[in-house]
Amino acid sequence: MKQILFCLSWFFGLSLVSAATAEKPNVVLFLADDMGWMDSGVYGSKYYETPNIDRFATRGVRFTRAYAQPLCSPTRASILSGKHTPRHGILTASGHRPPQPPGHQFMPETAAPNQPMLVPESKNYLDLSEVTLAEALHGAGYRTAHIGKWHLGLMAEHRPEKQGFDVAFHCAPDPGPPGEYFSPYGVIPEGNPNAKIKVGTITDGPEGEYIVDRQAAEAVKFIRESKDQPFFLNLWCYGVHGPWGHKKEYTEEFAKKTDPRGVQGNPIMASMLRSVDECFGKIMDELDQLGLTENTIVIFYSDNGGNTHSNVPSTAKTEKAEKFKSEFLADWRKWAGDRPPTDNTPLREGKSSLYEGGTRVPMIWSWGKRFAPTVNEDSLVGHIDIYPTILELTGVARPPEQKLDGVSLAPVLTGQGMLERTAFFNYFPYRPNEGGATVCHGDFKLIRWFGEGVPRELYNLKEDLGETNNLAAQMPGKVAELEALLEGYLADTGALIPKPNPAYTPRVNAKIAADPMRGLVPKASKATLKKGYVLIEGQGKKPFLGHASVQSKVSGPSVLHLRARSAVGGQGRLHWRTAGQATYEEGIQSVDYELPAGEAWQDIKVNIPVKGKLVAFRLYLPAEKEPVEIESLALESQASGQATASWNFAIQP
């Protein structure tokens, strides 16, 4: 009966869409770069200000369980092809590299002796055999434009002009903005600091013009020129990707603001997000002013999770590049100190990670009054669904030669039915743990790492959004159920799986060989190094590992990340001493934590309210009755999200 009702609702939903598309609707896809799930007001930020995005969310359907790939190029390729990443072959952000020759072997047969695994290579371009979303719409009479970042091919034959776009304004092949965020635009070639070249089709604007503002102007121009025919605007915003060019006047405002949650607080990122929001707002306003809103499908989306680690903006070894790098770092420190670009709390980690912080992103759809304002908290949706959804909403036929892995979201968007999906998959064959794959099914998420001997991770995302409690050992039946789904996905898509490198020869780290415990001293306990971990056996009351002089001198509120396991578990404690304290007893500073019992590795996160500089610590372990095994531990600055001291016992001499 449920299936019958679903089929009927889908039929009437399709009829509604078909009737509404007697006049083909316009399509605007606005893709932000590196914008995290928590980086707008409507998704929960109390620091960033995004009034246009927030206002837009009141018009349409906002998904809270939307996903993307951990990095940009794979997501972008899936948007345009409608395919899972293993099918189109773009597995990482490699769209700026030279294309591989015909017949290239993407799964290597050999690797260097210091590489533990044979890892598949990413294709560096979107193959011309793909019938892109732009080509499908263009063939149905749409005028098409790509404005902004491309990152799907280095050579001219792989750029937007060859993939179905009539109009192209881009700086391909750059992974980020064109050299800098401000006009005059351009990049500095390696070895020639005096040369300045234009890339793609970008043209300079007035001196000091901000590239995100220019994108808005080009979008408005395209909309005005195309208003009398159906159009597809594919705007892939340069913000908020590094090297984090920002308007100083905005940054100054946010530097005076604090986050009441005590989580986000980078004024550079806040400034850039305001510019992205303004760009989006100008497009929305233009549609309103031209009377096109009621007949325009608009999608707001991001290409991967928020960036939680800053990086150096250029690797070019030229005098000019080094000068820019130095100026950038000085500017970053002035405004952001040691803060990361953003913070995805309550999600775990960020960009380039298979945890929720790296893959869960904002997604909002509107179509005038045809989509009732709704918050959808149940549907699992993502990058592969945009292509088939747009085709159904516009009434454009599916290209028979193009395999589409996604499903149409039209039944949910129109309120007429449910999705034809029960699980959503992700695949990223790169580190850590030599990459992995995930499946979300109902409330649960399973992570399978491809590294040898790495255990599965199972989380109940409804109860544990931060992925802190691995349930794999307690729920083997659920693991087996999701594992079967994942295996089916990997087999169906032909995913290349990393495998052990037969030539691997572990290098001996001289420093680790000299001090295998890396400065940690067992007290009331015995420490024995095993393969991949250290075994701590209690030999008295209150066994602990002590470190008398933390080399990095951790400053300010910090986090201890402990990966451990114990058959019986129990309560532990972290006791620390700050600069100026002669003994631990002088103003006792400590915090308790709980190590769950079980055979699976547990990832423990302990917030440490450090005031001043942490110079030494004692990690008390529940090892009096049964041993505790530790794979790794790390101290991390809450402000920067960067590890300030770490011990990884999986790496051994």
Image (cartoon, rainbow, N blue to C red):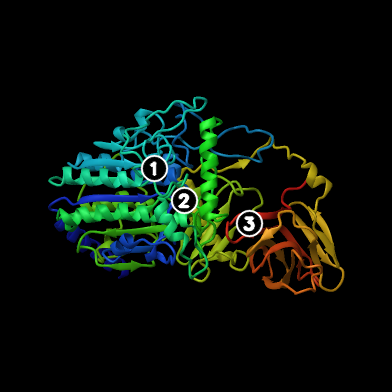
Query: With 365 as the anchor, is 434 left or right in this view?
Result: right
Q: Which residue is mark 2?
A: 489
Q: Which residue is mark 1?
A: 77
Q: Is residue 420 above or below residue 506?
A: below
Residue 575 image offset from top left, x and y in percent: 74, 69
> Quick one: 507 or 120, which is closer to the camera?
507
Who's the residue at 31% across and 51% down the image? 279
Who's the residue at 20% across and 46% down the image? 223
Q: Which residue is mark 3?
A: 455
Residue 401 image offset from top left, x and y in percent: 30, 39
Quadrant that contains the C terminus? top right
| C-alpha distance separating marks 3 and 1 | 30 Å
Q: Secondary structure at mark 2?
A: helix
| C-alpha distance separating marks 1 and 2 | 18 Å
Q: Do tag 1 and tag 2 residues touch (Cβ < 8 Å)?
A: no
Who's the residue at 78% across and 68% down the image? 581
Who's the residue at 48% across and 66% down the image? 258
> Quick one: 34 or 579, which is closer to the camera?
579
Of badges 1 and 2, nearer the viewer stands 1
Q: Earlier in the sequence, mark 1 or mark 2?
A: 1
Picture quadrant of residue 562? bottom right
Query: With 645 as the anchor, is 220 left or right in this view?
Result: left
The type of residue carrying mark 2 is: Tyr
Residue 615 image offset from top left, x and y in percent: 74, 61
Of badges 3 and 2, nearer the viewer stands 3
The type of residue carrying mark 3 is: Pro
Query: With 141 as the anchor, is 203 left or right in this view?
Result: right
Q: In this view of the protein, can residue 106 be seen by the observer?
A: no
